[in-house]
Image: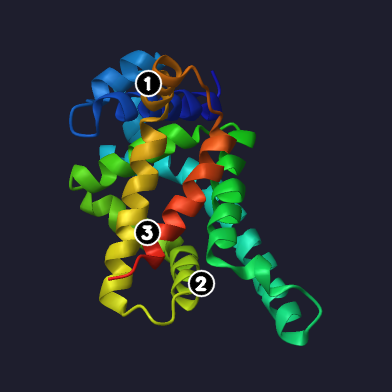
Amino acid sequence: MSQLDTVNRILDAAEVLFAERGFTETSLRTITSTAGVNLAAVNYHFGSKKELIQAVFERFLTPFTENLDRELSRRKALEKQVQDGTADGEALALDDLLQSLYQVALAGLAKEGRDPKRFMRLLGLAYTQSQGHLRRFIVSRYGESYRQIAGQLAQALPHVDPVTFYWRLYFMLGATIFSLSSFDAIEAILREDFGAESSLEETLARLAPAAAAMLTAHE
């Protein structure tokens, strides 16, 4: 088995187990047993459990932020065209911004072989299980992408004060994380109660206007 194969097997096992059981509840021994490697392999390739957790997130966050950055660059170019009078300003509406970000950044993960639902589950756990090291890692490595999207959202809401915007942004993120991390259960209820089904793309399309409404709600 090559070193790359070993690394990927450890990451694959850790990703699934962390999402199913949580970070604190999943031991390195359980991960290595599932991956079919010895415990020393984790220490050799990652150094510690914290660094393994960070590596699991890196596999999601790198393509996610690359997709996000490309979409933000596209929108900046469109904004310049609107200012120059060569494009329609409707495409810069908040609802459209969220729609494009959901579709490009989240749906883009699925196209690259990463499960957006599992990503949301892991992200939710990162907030609820006090993984301070992970927050510092995300801020240091991917903070610029977050600042750019938060800046574009704030720019679309010039009359909302910073503290209110902060809370609305996290309410929106909470709704997004819950809806996608619980997607399978929610879809099962939808199918049972309404005889309807929904794909990830359809769900994201429904989520964007709801998220926009959370950001623009009147006091």
Name which quarter of the figure residue 182 lies in: top left
Instruction: Classify mark 3: residues with Cα within 10 Å, few (<14), some (14-19) or many (20+).
Output: some
Give the labeled residue for mark 2.
152
- The three-letter code of the residue at mark 1 reads Ile
Q: Earlier in the sequence, mark 3 or mark 1?
A: 1
Label 1, on which residue? 189
Residue 123 located left or right of residue 4: left
Q: Circle 2 — which element? A: helix
Q: Are marks 2 and 3 in contact (CB under 8 Å)?
A: no
- Do residues under tags 3 and 1 come within 8 Å of each other at their CB atoms? no
Label 3 – label 1 distance at C-alpha: 24 Å
- Does the rendering let one see residue 45? no
1 and 2 marks in contact (CB < 8 Å): no
Question: Is tag 2's residue or tag 3's residue first in the polypeptide sequence?
Answer: 2
Residue where numbered disc 3 is placed = 214
At 31% from the left and 49% from the top, the residue drawn is 174
**Helix, strand or loop under label 3:** helix
* Rendered residue at 44%/64% (across/down): 146
| Residue for point 54% across, 30% down | 4
| Viewport quadrant of the N terminus | top right
Q: What residue type is labelled 3?
A: Met
Q: Tell me the number on the disc at residue 74.
A: none
The amino acid type of the residue labelled 2 equals Gln
Select label 1 or label 2 by which is in front. Answer: 1
* Mark positioned earlier in the residue sequence (1 or 2): 2
**Whether residue 129 is situated above or below residue 36 in the rendered picture:** below
Viewer-side residue, 111 vs 86: 86
Percent of width and height locating residue 20: 30, 24
